[in-house]
Amino acid sequence: MPFLNQKFRFNKKELRRIIVRILWFGATALSFAVLVIWISFYLFNSPREKMLQRENNELKLALKEVNSKLNSINLVLDDIQDRDDYVYRAIFETDPIDREERYPFLLEQSEYADLSHDEAIDLIRATNKKTDRIMLRLALQSRSLDTVNRLVIEKEKMLQSIPAIRPIKNMSRVASGFGMRYHPILKTLRRHAGIDISAPRGTPVYATANGVVTSENAGSGYGINIVINHGYSYKTVYAHLSKKAVRAGQRVIRGQLIGYVGNTGLSMGAHLHYEVHKNGIPVNPVHFFFSDITPKEYDEILETSKKINQALS
């Protein structure tokens, strides 16, 4: 009986040891399994995760390309807006477009928050096509505006080069007009290539348009004279001066003082003989008095210039 009790105690101790070992191995195996699962889940991507990551990378590249194109479009639009606000609208004296009208999309809400992956891909492809077309249209429009801008600048230069004011301020009548007139010295009816404007000796004479003073002499009977080449096929002649205020080769602007009224050359009294030439042919200068004269003044000057009288030179 004592022997049996000792054997039973031995088996009970051995069983406890076996159970402890099993529990230890089980805990170790469970810990290892948890570690492996954790490593697999957090450090290594599954095939599906790899596929999603690849798709995300493709989306990022596509979005980056679209964003780059949109940045280019914004630059072109900014340039067009500046031209519209500060060039064309300035020329026609109109106010710039309001910000809300120019950017209506600022008031819109986003409608793309709940797009699926496939819908996002389709949207990006469609957006790429649209941005390509818009960029092409903007490039063509920008080149067109370049041309318009050059034409506006050239037109402004041309308008400044057309004789458009009176060469003597506050002149109210023409002593002798354009066309057939009696020569004061030769006493014959002959073509008068300009108009004669009576004025006291020393009265300031002004350039009627932008141009360059030439070294030409209008003629031996013109006395002291100035010829201005305005470009665009226009020239003007200022004759019988008492004194010049400009020199050959000098660039002048409309309204600039160029000389003084005199009585030099074949002249019967102090006056300015003024001519306008278009394509080398004299034309009636009165028709060019439109920038500094009222309609009533123009009619009066036109009527007096039509009279067939004796010219002053």
Image (spheres, rainbow, N blue to C red):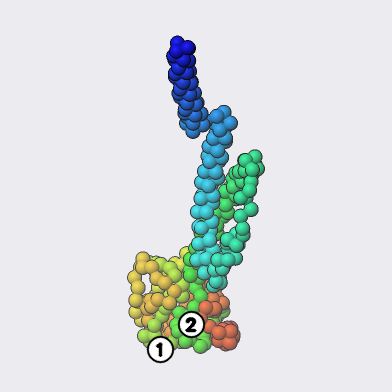
Up-down relation of residue 208 to residue 114 (above or below): below
Q: Residue at image x 51%, y 58%?
A: 78
Q: Residue at image x 40%, y 73%?
A: 226
Q: What residue type is labelled 1?
A: Pro
* Label 2 element class: strand
Residue 138's spot in the image, x, y percent? 57, 52
Outermost residue toward the front? 1
Q: Can residue 307 be seen?
A: no
Residue with the mark numbered 2: 196
Q: Which amino acid does label 2 sit on?
A: Asp
Residue 73's spot in the image, x, y percent? 54, 51
Label 2 crowd (10 A; few <14 / some 14-19 / many >=20): many
Q: In which quarter of the image is residue 218?
A: bottom left
Residue 3's spot in the image, x, y percent? 45, 11
Q: In which quarter of the image is residue 202?
A: bottom left
Up-down relation of residue 70 to residue 262 (above or below): above
The circle drawn on residue 27 is: none
Residue 199's spot in the image, x, y percent? 43, 87
Residue with the mark numbered 1: 200
Return the residue nearer the eye: 19 or 76.
Answer: 19
Q: How far apart are marks 2 and 1 (CA)?
A: 13 Å
Return the residue nearer the eye: 7 or 233.
Answer: 7
Q: Residue at image x 48%, y 70%?
A: 160
Asked if marks 2 and 1 touch (Cβ < 8 Å), the reply is no
Instruction: Tell me if 129 is positioned left or right of 53 in this view.
Output: right
Label 1 crowd (10 A; few <14 / some 14-19 / many >=20): some
Up-down relation of residue 145 to residue 171 (above or below): above
* Label 1 element class: loop
Q: Can residue 165 be seen?
A: yes
Return the residue nearer the eye: 108 or 75.
Answer: 108
Q: Residue at image x 48%, y 82%?
A: 196
